[in-house]
Amino acid sequence: STVQVICNFCFLAVKIFCIRSSWDILKAGNMDKTNQTFVLEFLLLGLSGYPKIEIIYFALILIMYLVILIGNGVLIIASIFDSRLHTPMYFFLGNLSFLDICYTSSSVPSTLVSLISKKRNISFCGCAVQMFFGFAMGSTECLLLGMMAFDRYVAICNPLRYPIIMSKVVYIAMASVSWFSGGINSVVQTALAMQLPFCGNNIINHFTCEILAVLKLACADISLNIITMVISNISFLVLPLLVIFFSYMFILYTILRMNSATGRRKAFSTCSAHLTVVIIFYGTIFFMYAKPKSQELSGENRLQTTDKLISLFYGVVTPTLNPIIYSLRNNDVKAAVKCLLNRKLIQ
């Protein structure tokens, strides 16, 4: 499929970058072993300062990861095999579920290993791959949420023209653009971050190779990284959020003008699940990156721990909630899942 082709292309790009980076590291080591500017691996601190609660977090993350795999997997299977879900809305939902599985699978297994076995090191290439998938999935999700809001806008505000505007060719192209743009954006950001010299500093104060945590280790000017990230944030955060905002303003205006109470309830029910996911997703991101920084050392340490826990919420809890929210708030999804389960029980 188109998504698989795009994923394979992006993975090949990261693999080529890793091979090139490894060659640069070996070459630098042969040229000057005393003045190392490259690192062979990174050390992820995670919750190393709180050993008593690591086992609790291990159990919680493991349970949530299983819920992510099962819940999103069921949604994907239902959207494929149930003809009632062969619409643009559920096509985007299937993409979102597949994205959540890919995103968590790129980081959660290594986090679980580090919590239970104290193995916290990750190779340079492993860090690059993890950073790529994290950034790519986050960028793609922003665009997909914007596409889903536009789909709801057309369905409610222009129902007669909906089959024409949101034809199969159009919504597949919209999803493909989301995946391709997210992958290209991540390739650029990952390449710029991992080419920086780290001067032997390889301790990442995070659960994963999160790009901002890695940039803090660089011993060179990161102005270019900051500029490209600002452009990326405007393109993948602000613009989709504007699309979502104006789409729901028009949707709300249209719903309030409806004479039928049943029509209003149906319109609200089709939008409430998506709007809930948007609020959780964007609320977590803005809380992570838009809050003030503490100047005191003790306050800074507490803030870093809070940052890591919020990042964990964003990376694990949000994908866990997505299938639950869509299942509870959508009658079509509930009916499709029940039908799928009944079919399995009969077999």
Image: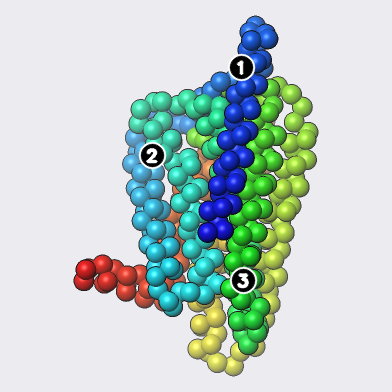
Q: CA distance from mark 1 to mark 2?
A: 37 Å
Q: CA distance from mark 2 to mark 3?
A: 44 Å
Q: Nearer the viewer, residue 53 or 247?
A: 247
Picture residue at 61% right of the left edge, 60% below the top: 176
Outermost top residue: 34
Q: Looking at numbered disc 3 in the image, what kind of residue is underneath it?
A: Val
Q: Secondary structure at mark 1?
A: helix
Give the vertical position of 162 relative to 304 (above or below): below
Point out the tag, 1 or 2, that comes first from the N-terminus. Answer: 1
| Residue 316 location (% of width, % of height) | 46, 48
Tell me if I can see residue 287 in this picture: no
Q: Is disc 2 surrounded by few (<14), some (14 to 19) or many (20+) residues within 10 Å?
A: some
Q: Looking at numbered disc 2 in the image, what kind of residue is underneath it?
A: Tyr
| Residue 253 location (% of width, % of height) | 67, 81
Tell me if I can see residue 166 in this picture: yes
Picture residue at 59% right of the left edge, 93% below the top: 259
Q: Are the two marked residues, 1 and 2, in contact with CB atoms closer than 8 angstroms?
A: no
Q: Identify the residue under disc 1.
A: 26
Q: Are the two marked residues, 2 and 3, in contact with CB atoms closer than 8 angstroms?
A: no
Side (left or right) of 158 relative to 94: right
Picture residue at 44% right of the left edge, 68% below the top: 79
Give the vertical position of 241 relative to 329 (above or below): above
Q: Looking at numbered disc 1 in the image, what kind of residue is underneath it?
A: Leu
Residue 344 found in image quarter? bottom left
Q: How is the image coloured?
A: rainbow
| Residue 88 location (% of width, % of height) | 55, 72
Label of residue 169 in the image: 3
Q: Identify the residue under disc 2.
A: 57
Q: Is disc 3 surrounded by few (<14), some (14 to 19) or many (20+) residues within 10 Å?
A: few
